[in-house]
Amino acid sequence: MTDSRLLLGPGPSNPYPEVMEALGRPVLGHLDPEFLAVFDETCERLRRAFQTANALTLPVSGTGSAGMEACLVNLLEPGDAAIVGVNGVFGGRLAEIATRCGATVIRVEAPWGRPIDPDDLLAAQRRAPGARLVATVHAETSTGVENPLAPLAALADTDTLLVVDAVTSLGGIPLDVDSWRIDACYSGTQKCLGVPPGLAPVTFSARAAERIRTRATPPQSWYLDLGLVGAYQSERRYHHTLPISMIYALHAGLGVLLDEGLDAAWARHRAAAERLYAALPSLGFEFLVDESHRLPELTTAFLPPGLDDAVARSRLLDDHGIEVGGGLGEFAGRLWRIGLMGHNARPEVVDRLVEAIRTLI
Amino acid sequence: MTDSRLLLGPGPSNPYPEVMEALGRPVLGHLDPEFLAVFDETCERLRRAFQTANALTLPVSGTGSAGMEACLVNLLEPGDAAIVGVNGVFGGRLAEIATRCGATVIRVEAPWGRPIDPDDLLAAQRRAPGARLVATVHAETSTGVENPLAPLAALADTDTLLVVDAVTSLGGIPLDVDSWRIDACYSGTQKCLGVPPGLAPVTFSARAAERIRTRATPPQSWYLDLGLVGAYQSERRYHHTLPISMIYALHAGLGVLLDEGLDAAWARHRAAAERLYAALPSLGFEFLVDESHRLPELTTAFLPPGLDDAVARSRLLDDHGIEVGGGLGEFAGRLWRIGLMGHNARPEVVDRLVEAIRTLI
């Protein structure tokens, strides 16, 4: 068993030391008053991280994709129209899950590596004003693109809900659920929050929660039914046994984030990325994404000519203990996805990576 | 923050020390060869615990109820008939989830506290020979009843699949997936396996896996789609980021179980239960379940006259650091559910509980 790895792929990232300590705390029952206090504080910390006052804010008991599914199965019913922004794997996954909910999916696409123009999403909604929701990805983990969200606040003046994938953005770049008038937002723990994978924080606006209450049919998932999960949060009504240890870990990770402060954490991610941006061209890498839409927490760069993807990633892992991610889809074998997330968004981490890459070329 | 609790409710139980140690191991990526080796070994250990050779055997990334949902959403399609045994909360949950899958549910009931006669399930299948599946609970956590399963092996000679809830049985009482010809079986980690909550081991027979492959429609859940999750297991195709730390914990818990041996673990659960059975009547408790169907890992007993449920459970928790479970449904306030599961199935644990109860009466 290896001692440790430096996890600089698209996630998981290395957890904060405080998080690993919290994981080992004695297990409590899911109805124990001491656990409920930790759970409530975790939800309150999530509200601060999401920048929201939403009552229905909690960690779903699954990984980030379970958060995606939770948002869609609770808000969609068969026959609804769903407008989905697709410019990478995770936009495609939103469309796939919406289809499985029985929705008619209207895709709004942009090429991989380019952002989705928010005006295109708004125009699609004007053409389909009865659409139940617009769903889009904030930080597209497959390409390293940030999709601009703020203009989509205009949807709050329509009957269409705004659903945002913040799996790779929460804690890493500015995300302001209430100011941006987001109706449903989900994230994952293993990216910029610096917590192992296993939970999916979600938050729902009052009108999204009202939508859940007034559905004609129950959500097709019982496990992810937020009417039932929410009753555990608000009334302690038993639904399922929560993943206690993972909630301790999330509680601790959010504590680290909020002690540092959101602004400081974003600035730290930005500074680490700029250090990497400064080094990569000199190593022969070329960026996929224009700087204006490049995610600081996840950099995508084409390999220098002559550097073989599989060989180089194996050597990084085996000789240097560093994991980076490969490209997906059309970029497979051609680019790397380099994550500087959570605890790893530090200059010394960047320097260790750059030194290691230098030995390969 | 409390130092520790003795968790003697219906779960979670206290994890084995080896499990808590494993939780703290450094996080690896979900495609790291070292992690994949741990994952594969976890699946192999699950096969030994389930007593099966089923290839499709793995931990689903959610708690036990996610395992229940995974079995039903993968095997059922809208319009299918599902025969469900109901004699407690978890049988009722099976019926509810099957309904949300669009199935027509045929309920076969028994009173809470009594087992379901397997002949009743077989007779229901003979009346509805086209039923897609029969689903029943092995160890009904809401009442402490063991439902006999072995006669249901006859279903393997029909077109109807046998689905078994083994959340509270795996590791605690004999369960033999292959000999009993079970087609789909799910469990949870936080009961007799002595692991924190967060994963749902599942196993599918060859004919159940074939059923998944030949569905007319994709499962309504993308997250729990075992065609996709299975492709990660067999071909390393990315589906979702696995809960790495929890898989370490499960790997370690199964190691403890298999090192001890299934027979020895079952005997240990039985011996702890008999020690409790010997003590409870002298404390004024009366058993709900006839001894022939009483679960050793979960004892249900009516409180002595004059002992107030809420007051007594609070004192147990606050003064003695011991959690026991209250009754559900018609038994709320009237009986306790006392779990002796996994690491807690030990005589000294029973003695500590009995001494604590003695101070209350």
Image: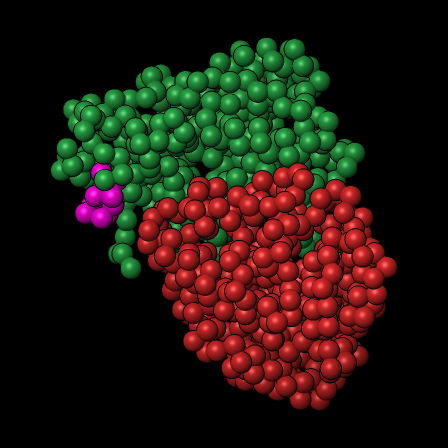
Chain colours: A red, B green
Q: Residue B269: where, in percent of width, then height?
A: 33, 31
Q: Is residue A30 left or right of residue A278?
A: left
Determine the residue located farthest toward the right in the rendered image.
A127
Query: Does residue B131 show up?
Result: yes
Q: Is residue B312 left or right of residue B200?
A: left
Q: Residue B66: where, in percent of width, then height?
A: 55, 42
- Reply above or below: A160 against B225: below
Residue drawn 73% across the image and 57% down it: A160
- Reply above or below: A131 against B302: below
Determine the residue located farthest toward the front in the rendered image.
A157
Q: Which quadrant of the rendered structure holds the C terminus of chain A?
A: bottom right
What secondary structure do most residues of the magenta stretch adopt?
helix
Write down the quadrant of residue B271 in the picture.
top left
Q: Which residues are magenta?
A: B312-321
Query: Does residue A307 show up?
Result: no
Write down the quadrant of residue A110 in the picture.
bottom right
